[in-house]
Amino acid sequence: MTLHKVLAAAIGGILLISLALSVLYLTAIHRIASLETEAGDRLPPNVPGRFVRIGRHRVHVVERGEGAAILLVPGTGGTTLDWETSVLDDLGQDHRVVALDLYGMGFSDRDDTFAYGVSLWADQLAGTLDALGLDRVSVIGQSLGGAIALVFAGRYPSRVNRAVSVDSGPWMPAFMLLMVTPGIGETILSQSDYWPERPDQPGAVRRAPARRLSHPRNATESPAGDPG
């Protein structure tokens, strides 16, 4: 086979793959759009919690208990369900606990004008506290949420009692490589109205935050004021 034929075959294969991914992408985003919550303040009937607003943007929160406040921040692709299935009820026995969905994830708003990143999400945490009437919290973040918790503590030190980063690191699970592939990620996300379980996270794995939080050596804690 000549070099010309090899190049032609390679280009043809690339074009076919690009076409297939484009079809997957267009099909998936149409389904995702059909699953989006309406512009009002009502969640789908099978989803717990409520919306609060930061300006014109909605933030989905799930709350438990009374007492000193704790804010729970999920990791990449995570939602309030990560905490609902692990430590939310236990922490709510003697604290006011708030779990939230980050912008662009779960049922919180998505906006093409957002500059997605830890600064945006740290400001989202502050806005959520304002909407809930909370002045000061202890914030616990898992994975990406741990980085957000620490950035939040740095930007808003007067609002943080303690910042706890759980299982955070610079690595990316192999599964997430699929999620960031155009067409494939959207197709995976479009398969469920409410993503209760990531394909790489069976129930035992989703309960891992409870185990990790029960062992302080596995968490990085940054006091930012008096304990609460």
Image: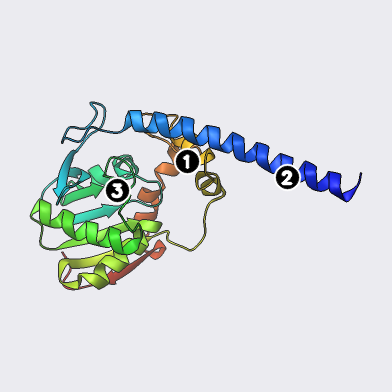
Going 29% across and 50% down the picture, which residue do you hit? 103
The numbered mark at residue 11 is: 2
Q: Earlier in the sequence, mark 1 or mark 2?
A: 2
Given contact means CB atoms under 8 Å apart, are the residues at marks 1 and 2 in contact? Answer: no
Going 30% across and 55% down the picture, which residue do you hit? 114
The numbered mark at residue 111 is: 3
Mark 1 to mark 2: distance in Å? 37 Å
Q: Earlier in the sequence, mark 2 or mark 3?
A: 2
Relative vertical location of residue 11 with respect to residue 158 in this rendering, above or below: above
Q: Amino acid at mark 2?
A: Ile
Q: Nearer the viewer, residue 221 or 216?
A: 221
Residue 137 screen position, x and y as percent: 17, 61
Going 15% across and 56% down the picture, which residue do you hit? 129
> What is the secondary structure assignment of the residue under circle 1?
loop
Circle count: 3
Question: Can residue 3 be seen in this snapshot?
Answer: yes
